[in-house]
Image (spheres, rainbow, N blue to C red):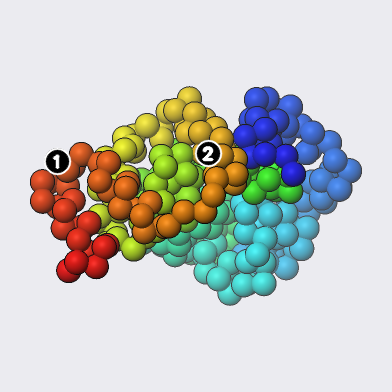
Amino acid sequence: MIGAAASYAIYARDLTASLQKIANQKSVQAATKAFERDLSKVKTIDDFMSTKSVYVYALKAYGLEDDMGSKGLIRKVLAGGTASGSLASKLTNGGFKSLASAFTFDSSGNATFNASVAAAVETAYYRQGMENAAGEMNGGAQLALYFQRTAASVSGVYGLLGDGNLLKVVQGALGLPASMSNLSIDAQAKLIESKLDVSDLQDPAKVSKLAAKYAARTDAQSTKPSSNPLSDLLASLRSTDSRSYGGAGTASILNIVSGQQ
């Protein structure tokens, strides 16, 4: 199997060419043609739900393929929009919010989007296809590409903690063990903030660097002898400046994790 770093590099070094390669696939061209043909038929939420060529294409575009059978959930997401407090804004999978942002409906369920939405949905479809293709080569590469695409949408460290895939990449890139999940959510947040300025996720260059670092470390980890997760976590905590936790905070966390409290 090709390593994560090499697989990630294949797609990331020229995203435009990588996306075009996906767009040129015959199966993708057929699905896109059907989507464009039938999009004009969607006048209501009911139409969206019943027009298979649009429904399937849209959910695949936003990484919601596994949720295709959850039609009740999809209907509620579309009906609720993306305003603060909406269902789409509460779900941890950002794909739901992206779906509701693209396909907008009024309070009566009538479509308020127009044909211009097609270009954005098609680009998302190609991107998702590219990430899936990378995943067939190496799962780590797929996660790195996902991180590259979505990191900028994170709202603070707690938003990062709320997305398991993004968190996995950050943990890998920063050398933080998955066992840090044994800590309280606040302690996890402080640990991440001690090693990462979350505002850096708004910088595409820094995001790409983190993604590449995660991919490289994934390869290194795959050849590394297995270690004790608790020992890894304790080592990460001890290596963090105690001032980040307010002095005795780190010692307290260490005691909890090691069973001394």
Residue type at numbered disc 1: Arg
Q: Amino acid at mark 2?
A: Arg
Q: Where residue 217 is drawn, which disc sits there? A: 2
> Which residue: 30% across, 53% down?
234
* Element carrying mark 2: helix
Which image quarter holds the N terminus?
Answer: top right
Which residue is at 41% across, 35% downward? 201
Locate residue 154, reporting x and y percent.
Answer: 40, 45
Front residue of 178/150: it is 178
Identify the residue at image location x=86%, y=48%: 27
From the viewer's perspective, tell me whether residue 55 is left or right of residue 231: right
94 sits to left or right of 180:
right
SS assignment at label 1: helix
On the image, the x and y values in percent for residue 209 come to 49, 29
Q: Residue 29 versus residue 108: which sits nearer the camera?
A: 29
**Mark 1–mark 2 contact, CB under 8 Å?**
no
The percent position of residue 182, horizontal first and vertical second, equals 34, 63
Task: Of the two numbered discs 1 and 2 on the same chain, state the one appearing first in sequence.
Answer: 2
